[in-house]
Amino acid sequence: MAKRQLTRRQSWRIDKVQQERAARAAKRETRAMQELQGGELGDEQNGLVIAHFGVQVEVEALAGELKGQIFRCHLRANLPSLVTGDQVVWRPNNTGGGVIVAQHPRHSELCRPDSRGLLKPVAANVDLIVIVFAPLPEPHANLIDRYLVAAEHAGIQPLLLLNKADLIDAQNGEAIHKLLAVYRTLGYPILEVSAHQGDGMEKLRAELNGRISVFVGQSGVGKSSLVNSLLPDVETRVGALSELTGKGTHTTTTARLFHFPGGGELIDSPGIREFGLSHVSRDDVEAGFIEFRDLLGRCRFRDCNHDREPGCALLKALEEGTVQHQRMQSYRYILSTLQEK
Ligand code: GDP
Ligand code: ZN
């Protein structure tokens, strides 16, 4: 669509909306400052951001007599925007809310492009990315590899979780075990479970304990079923998550943090379940194939495409079997999807 000139009336309206927005932000800031200076606030303490709603966040108190309670907090204006999983310093007010005064450094970030294509963090301090796949829908290795690249890029440990183990049979068994062997060779942790029958779920609980996890994977692999069985008392279906924010089923829905009763936390939202499917660069892809790491930079040509070039370290490794065919195929496929964009 061609760019239109704004009419004077339209520009006036836009200015007005922006002025009103600025005025509202200033008012919030004044209120937060008044609270801070008025001495009406309780002591500084540590908290965990469990959800964010525009300019407000929900903070769970981490210690002291308020431990476990949840407070709607305003942010002091000099703070960067916070996301679910952030650790903060905050002070309670006397109306059941509070003010956030500082943010602790993050040890990891999950980012996604916003509506304008800018990468924005959507969750902080995630320790484990659980990549879920199943015999049905038939697993695509390149999709798993794509999630692995995203996990490596974010510096977060992945766990490969084969769900619906009850559906492994004589027909699909060989292909699935071949697929698992590829990742076992690479040293990635793998678990086989059945959300329906409960097999392997104790082992999964043990893996989740003490860490903040996210579940990712193709639609239909059983993420909701797994999460519902791990969080029996909480309504965490994606639909319910969307309703919480009143924004319908749009994928920008806020991420929420839940506590597993057996220990550990889950950060979940429809957007996070698709994490890893957008935005990776060619370099990220190369760096995300862990078996390539020692080989990169060893090709004869600096700009080697690892395609047919003589003296290619990756092709040599492929021939010698230290790089597996299936992974090389995935690598090429993922690159081809990047180039199409
Ligand atoms: P999601 O799209 O990844 O959230 O997947 P769902 O949790 O909605 O599950 C998709 C389908 O797989 C549903 O029909 C589930 O009942 C089924 N399902 C989930 N876990 C298992 C399992 O362990 N075994 C079997 N046989 N089916 C499962
Ligand atoms: Zn090469």
Image: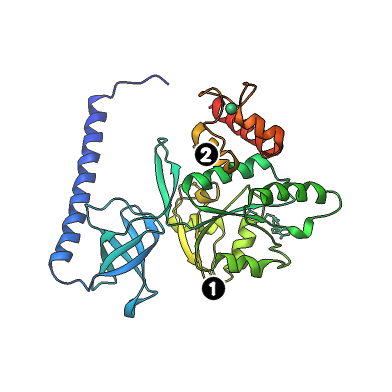
Q: Residues within 10 Å of mark 1 (few under 14, many from 20)?
A: few
Q: Residue furthest right?
A: 170
Q: Nearer the viewer, residue 151 or 37?
A: 151
Image quarter for residue 323? top right
- SS class of the residue under badge 2? helix
* Residue annotated with mark 2: 287
* Residue annotated with mark 1: 261
Seen at 34% across and 54% down, the residue is 82
Image quarter for residue 167? bottom right
From this view, report whether residue 209 is shown above or below residue 22.
Answer: below
Mark 2 residue type:
Ala
User: Which mark is nearer the camera, 2 or 1?
Assistant: 2
From this view, report whether residue 320 is shown above or below residue 3.
Answer: below
Q: Nearer the viewer, residue 333 or 341?
A: 333
Seen at 25% across and 34% down, the residue is 14
On the picture, is 28 further left or further right than 50? left
On the picture, is 144 further left or further right than 341? right
- SS class of the residue under badge 1? loop
| Sequence-first disc among 2 and 1 | 1
On the picture, is 281 further left or further right than 119? right
From this view, report whether residue 31 is shown above or below residue 40.
Answer: above
Answer whether residue 247 is visible to the viewer in this image.
yes
2 and 1 marks in contact (CB < 8 Å): no
Mark 1 residue type:
Pro
Q: For the residue with label 1, is its CB less than 8 Å from the closest atom of ligand 1?
A: no
Between the residue at mark 2 and the residue at mark 1, the CA separation in whole angstroms equals 36 Å
On the picture, is 149 further left or further right than 45? right
The quadrant of the rendering that contains the N terminus is top left
User: Where does the image place residue 245, in percent across and percent down from the top left?
Assistant: 43, 56
Q: Nearer the viewer, residue 123 or 107?
A: 107
For ligand 1, give the image quadrant. bottom right
